[in-house]
Amino acid sequence: MMCPICGAHTVVKETRDSRRRRECFNLHKFSTHEVVIEERAFDWRDVASHPGKATQVASHYSISVNHVYAYRSRLRDEQRSSAMESRNLQPA
Ligand SMILES: [Zn+2]
């Protein structure tokens, strides 16, 4: 956390519950308040089966294009192996 007054690095002088008292290297004092950030949750299968270009899907879910490719390939592998399983279950 940088000092809001001068932009210098700061150190935590005191922590009480979610409040922190900080001081910068130029001795400016200020307080911060810690909050929990909600992580965006998604099912990788939803990503993998989402229609559209990989770049569009990536920006829709705020993930990298490589993740979209990885999820799609994982889904293809799953579908391939489940197709093979159902063939093996057919009576001869
Ligand atoms: Zn400062």
Image (cartoon, rainbow, N blue to C red):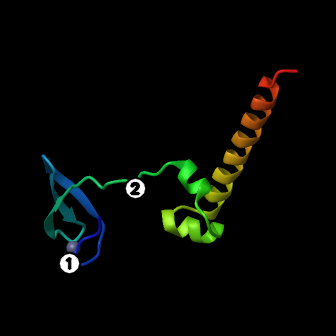
**Comes first in the chain, label 1 or label 2:** 1
Q: In terms of image quadrants, where is residue 31?
A: bottom left
Establish if 18 lies above or below 82: below
Q: In terms of image quadrants, where is residue 25?
A: bottom left
Find disc 1 in the rendering and name its residue.
5
Number of other residues with Cα within 10 Å of mark 2, as a class: few under 14, some 14 to 19, many 20 or more: few
The front one of 13 and 88 is 88
Q: CA distance from mark 1 to mark 2?
A: 33 Å
Image point 29% across, 72% down: which residue? 8
Ligand 1 within 8 A of label 1's CB? yes
Establish if 58 lies above or below 44: below
Image region (quadrant) for ligand 1: bottom left
In the image as oriented, which residue stretches furthest toward the bottom? Answer: 6
In the image as oriented, which residue stretches furthest toward the left? Answer: 16
Q: Specify the amino acid type for callout 2.
A: Arg
The front one of 3 and 74 is 74
Q: Specify the amino acid type for callout 1.
A: Ile
Ligand 1 within 8 A of label 2's CB? no
**Label 1: element kind:** loop
Image point 32% across, 54% down: which residue? 38
Image point 54% across, 53% down: which residue? 46
x, y percent for residue 61: 49, 62
x, y percent for residue 16: 11, 47
80 on left or right of 45: right
Find disc 2 in the rendering and name its residue.
40
